[in-house]
Image (cartoon, grey):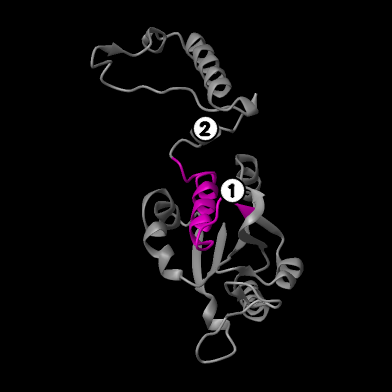
């Protein structure tokens, strides 16, 4: 998978993309994530990519021309791809959306900033708009990193055990069950006996029941 990110702050991506699972996935050649500075496609030497909104109001709006040139340049260098705008009024990111997008060959992520992005660019060049929650951040950079992380771990070969990703919370419409590890007794509390019984059928049944109960308690809207 190829992921190109168009942003005002490419330096925000260097460290997070170089470590942990995403960093290892890139090292294996399973994914390539590139952050591009939007200002390189500005019209002037100052790198102006935003302006005041028509009709007045606070904040600045990202101009459509630099964004268009950026998308066209990335597609010219790395092939056609689905353009995704990270914006607070986009569709809420879910595990199902992450599953679907992980099958794409090329994604182009646009990081909104300031007051937002010119609506004409959104209507003509954006294929999908995604939000990571009902709150506003200073820009789309952190949401883009969240999306990249959610997608990369679903690519076969990225995790040591791909099946573990398919058993995560939300994959089957429920939250995950409780998990335990050594020591078997911690501060006087032992792990549930069924987990050390060796009866794998009973363990699967217990985990399913626990997942359902946790979902009912914490996220009744999912039941």
* Quarter of the rendering containing residue 216: top right
Mark 1 and mark 2: span between their CA atoms? 23 Å
Percent position of residue 11, x then y: 41, 69
Q: Is residue 20 above or below residue 60?
A: above
**Residue drawn at 42 percent across, 65 percent down:** 12
Q: Is residue 86 left or right of residue 54?
A: left
Q: Is residue 131 magenta?
A: yes
The residue tagged 2 is 168
Foreground of the two, 4 or 176: 176
Which percent across, then down, holds residue 180?
A: 36, 22
Above-or-below relation of 87 to 60: above
Q: Which residues fall within the magenta stretch?
A: 130-159
Taking depth in this image into account, of 24 and 112 the one nearest to the observer is: 112
Q: Residue furthest bottom?
A: 45
Measured from the top left, where is residue 82 in percent x and y?
68, 61
Label 2 secondary element? loop
Q: Quadrant of residue 183?
A: top left
Residue in the image at 72% along x and 69% along y: 119
Residue depth check, mark 1 versus mark 2: number of the one nearer the observer: 1
Tell which of 94 and 221 is nearer to you: 221
Image point (50%, 73%), residue name: 8
Q: Where is 217 relative to 93, above or below?
A: above
Which label number is shown at residue 134? 1
The image position of residue 179, as x and y in percent, is 41, 23
Q: Is residue 24 left or right of residue 67?
A: left
Identified at 23% across, 16% down, the residue is: 187
Which part of the image, by quadrant, shows the C terminus? top right
Q: Are marks 1 and 2 in contact (CB under 8 Å)?
A: no
Residue 86 relative to residue 26: left or right: right
Q: Nearer the viewer, residue 22 or 9?
A: 9
């Amino acid at each position: 998978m190829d992921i190109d990110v168009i942003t005002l702050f490419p330096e925000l991506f260097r460290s997070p993309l170089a470590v942990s699972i995403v960093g290892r996935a890139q090292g294996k050649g399973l994914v390539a994530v590139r952050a591009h500075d939007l200002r390189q496609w500005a019209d002037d030497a100052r790198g102006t990519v935003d302006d005041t909104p028509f009709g007045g109001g606070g904040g600045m709006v990202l101009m459509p021309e630099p964004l268009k040139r950026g998308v066209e340049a990335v597609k010219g260098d790395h092939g056609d791809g689905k353009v995704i705008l990270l914006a607070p009024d986009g569709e809420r990111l879910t595990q199902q959306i992450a599953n679907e997008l992980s099958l794409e060959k090329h994604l182009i992520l646009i990081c909104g900033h300031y007051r937002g992005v010119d609506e004409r660019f959104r209507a003509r060049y954006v294929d999908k708009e995604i939000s990571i929650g009902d709150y506003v951040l200073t820009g789309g950079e952190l949401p883009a990193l969240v999306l990249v992380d959610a997608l990369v771990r679903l690519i076969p070969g990225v995790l040591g055990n791909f099946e573990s990703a398919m058993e995560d919370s939300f994959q089957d419409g429920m939250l995950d069950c409780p998990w335990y590890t050594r020591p078997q007794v911690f501060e006087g509390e032992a792990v549930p006996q069924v987990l050390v019984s060796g009866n794998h059928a009973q363990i699967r049944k217990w985990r399913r029941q626990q997942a359902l109960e946790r979902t009912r308690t914490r996220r009744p809207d999912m039941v």
